[in-house]
Image: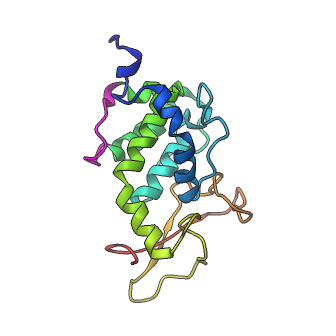
């Protein structure tokens, strides 16, 4: 097994500087419609260790449903599979430059430096997406779904809702969180060319 220093695992900032970003990252996750796990400052960050929350975030940011995710992983192999599925999508974004070699193992262990560093990189890389959505729905201090109701897609193939990356959204904010058995639709509306402006 390869050796590495604690700070080289994902080529990210020192943990102390990442802890200073936690309030901003929490607001960003809430803006996306995700209620951040209460252990965002804990060690390990258990909310990210099975890959389901990461897959959900990646799905929202990429306007796609990640297929084949194990939403109730029972084994380490299933958790690794979920994390690798999210990493595969993230690797396609040229603005997220990380040492991918050790990223999965560090996420499996819930290492705060890796989790917070990855969230910080994702926030920076998907800044355009978030700022475009904020302008399109006028969500000031809220999340992309504020003020929107689900409407069936028009016959002409226009604006359509983006399905939640993980089916039921256990991280949804607000009083209208879906029941565990329902299929949640992410409230961001997009056309075939991207977010509605």
Q: Nearer the viewer, residue 177 or 143?
A: 143
Quarter of the picture holding the N terminus: top left
Where in the figure is residue 128, as x and y percent of width and height? Answer: 35, 61
Which of these two is toward me, 87 or 73?
87
Give me the residue at 48% from left, 82% from top: 153
- What residue is drawn where x is 39% and y is 68%? 132
Q: Is residue 107 above or below residue 95?
A: above
Placement of 78 over or under 52, stated as above or below: above
Q: Quadrant of the C terminus?
A: bottom left
The image quadrant of residue 31 is: bottom right
Q: Residue 62 appears at what percent x and percent y?
A: 39, 57
Q: Position of residue 195 (x, y in %)?
A: 39, 72
Note whether 44 is above or below 159 in the view shown: above
Q: How is the image coloured?
A: rainbow
The residue shown at (37%, 14%) is 5
- Please state which of residues 114 and 17 is positioned toward the viewer in this rendering: 17
The range drawn in magenta is: 91-101
**Residue 67 visible to the viewer:** no
Q: Nearer the viewer, residue 146 or 106?
A: 146
Q: Measured from the top left, where is residue 11 in percent x and y?
A: 33, 28
- In this orientation, does residue 152 appear? yes
- Specify the farthest residue to the left: 94
- In the displayed structure image, the side of residue 54 where residue 47 appears, left or right: right
Q: Is residue 62 magenta?
A: no
Decide: is 103 above or below 135. Answer: above
Query: How many numbered discs, if any?
Result: 0
The residue drawn where x is 46% and y is 37% is 83
Our reading of the magenta stretch's main secondary structure is loop
């Amino acid at each position: 097994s390869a050796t590495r220093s604690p700070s080289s695992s994902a080529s990210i900032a020192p943990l102390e500087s990442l802890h200073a970003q936690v309030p901003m990252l929490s607001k960003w996750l809430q803006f996306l419609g995700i209620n951040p796990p209460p252990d965002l400052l804990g060690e390990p960050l258990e909310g990210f260790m099975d890959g389901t929350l990461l897959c959900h975030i990646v799905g929202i940011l990429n306007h796609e449903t990640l297929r084949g995710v194990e939403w109730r992983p029972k084994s380490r192999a299933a958790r690794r599979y979920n994390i690798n599925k999210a990493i595969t999508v993230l690797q396609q974004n040229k603005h997220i430059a990380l040492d991918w070699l050790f990223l999965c193992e560090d996420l499996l262990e819930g290492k705060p430096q890796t989790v917070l560093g990855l969230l910080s990189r994702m926030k920076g890389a998907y800044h355009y997406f978030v700022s475009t959505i904020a302008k399109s729905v006028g969500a000031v201090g809220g999340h992309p779904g504020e003020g929107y109701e689900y409407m069936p897609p028009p016959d002409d193939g226009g604006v359509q809702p983006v399905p939640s990356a993980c089916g039921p959204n256990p991280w949804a904010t607000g009083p209208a969180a879906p029941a565990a058995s329902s299929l949640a639709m992410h409230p961001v509306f997009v056309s075939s060319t991207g977010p509605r402006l």
